[in-house]
C-alpha cells in the first residue's frame, strides 16, 4: 500500500515536471530557446520537442499508456543529456540525470491503478 502511494506521488511529480518543461518549450521561454539553440534546434524543433514532452506526461497518467509515456519522456531527457555531454556541458547533463532516473523508478514501480 505504501509503495502505491509513494508511486502515485512520484507520478504526479513526474507529470507536473513534464508539463512544466513541455509548456515552457512550446511557449518558447527564453531559457529553453537558449538551451536548445546551442544545439542548433530551430524554434519549430523546440516546439515539437515540447509537444512530445507534454504528450508523454499526459500518457503517464493512464495505465494503458503508462509505459509508452515514461519511455517517451525518458527518451527526451536522454536526448538532452546526450546533447549536453556532446557540447561538454557536464553540469547541464547532471541536472537531467535525476529526472531520467525518476522515470526509470516510476516504470519499475508500475502504475498504481494497474491490476
Image (cartoon, helix red, strand yellow):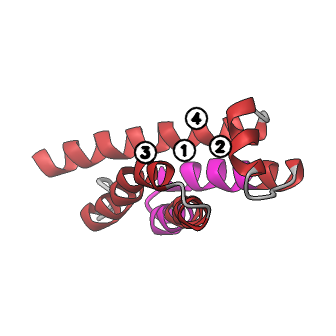
Q: Locate residue 80 relative to residue 33 in the image: left or right.
A: left
Q: Are marks 2 and 4 in contact (CB under 8 Å)?
A: yes
Q: Nearer the viewer, residue 75 or 93?
A: 93
Q: Locate residue 90 relative to residue 9 in the image: left or right.
A: right
Q: Does the stretch in magenta take in 40?
A: no
Residue that appears at 62% across and 61% down: 87
Q: Is residue 94 visible?
A: yes
Question: Disc 2 to disc 4, how far (Cα)?
Answer: 6 Å
Q: Which mark is residue 18?
A: 1
The first of marks 4 and 3 along the sequence is 3
Residue that appears at 81% across and 56% down: 41
Dot 4 falls on a residue whose secondary structure is helix
Horizontal and vertical percent position of residue 93 = 47, 55
The residue where tag 2 is placed is 22
Q: Locate residue 46 relative to residue 5 in the image: left or right.
A: right
Question: Disc 1 to disc 3, how far (Cα)?
Answer: 6 Å
Dot 2 falls on a residue whose secondary structure is helix
Dot 3 falls on a residue whose secondary structure is helix
Q: Are marks 1 and 3 in contact (CB under 8 Å)?
A: yes
Horizontal and vertical percent position of residue 29 = 74, 31
Q: Does the stretch in magenta take in 50?
A: yes
Q: Are marks 2 and 3 in contact (CB under 8 Å)?
A: no
Q: Which mark is residue 20?
A: 4
- The rendered magenta stretch, by its main secondary structure, is classed as helix
The residue where tag 3 is placed is 14
Residue 35 lies in what quarter of the image?
Answer: top right
Q: Badge 3: few (under 14), some or many (20 or more) residues near its Cα, within 10 Å?
A: many
Q: Are marks 2 and 1 in contact (CB under 8 Å)?
A: yes
Horizontal and vertical percent position of residue 51 = 73, 50
Magenta stretch in the rendered image: 49-73
Q: Are marks 4 and 1 in contact (CB under 8 Å)?
A: yes
Question: Disc 2 to disc 3, how far (Cα)?
Answer: 12 Å
Amino acid at each position: 500500500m505504501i509503495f502505491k502511494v509513494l508511486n502515485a506521488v512520484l507520478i504526479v511529480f513526474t507529470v507536473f515536471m513534464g508539463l512544466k518543461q513541455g509548456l515552457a518549450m512550446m511557449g518558447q521561454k527564453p531559457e529553453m530557446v537558449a538551451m536548445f539553440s546551442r544545439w542548433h534546434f530551430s524554434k519549430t524543433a523546440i516546439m515539437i520537442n515540447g509537444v512530445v514532452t507534454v504528450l508523454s506526461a499526459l500518457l503517464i497518467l493512464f495505465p494503458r499508456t503508462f509505459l509508452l509515456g515514461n519511455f517517451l519522456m525518458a527518451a527526451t531527457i536522454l536526448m538532452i543529456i546526450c546533447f549536453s555531454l556532446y557540447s561538454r556541458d557536464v553540469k547541464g547533463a547532471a541536472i537531467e540525470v535525476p529526472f531520467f532516473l525518476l522515470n526509470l523508478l516510476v516504470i519499475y514501480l508500475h502504475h498504481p491503478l494497474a491490476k
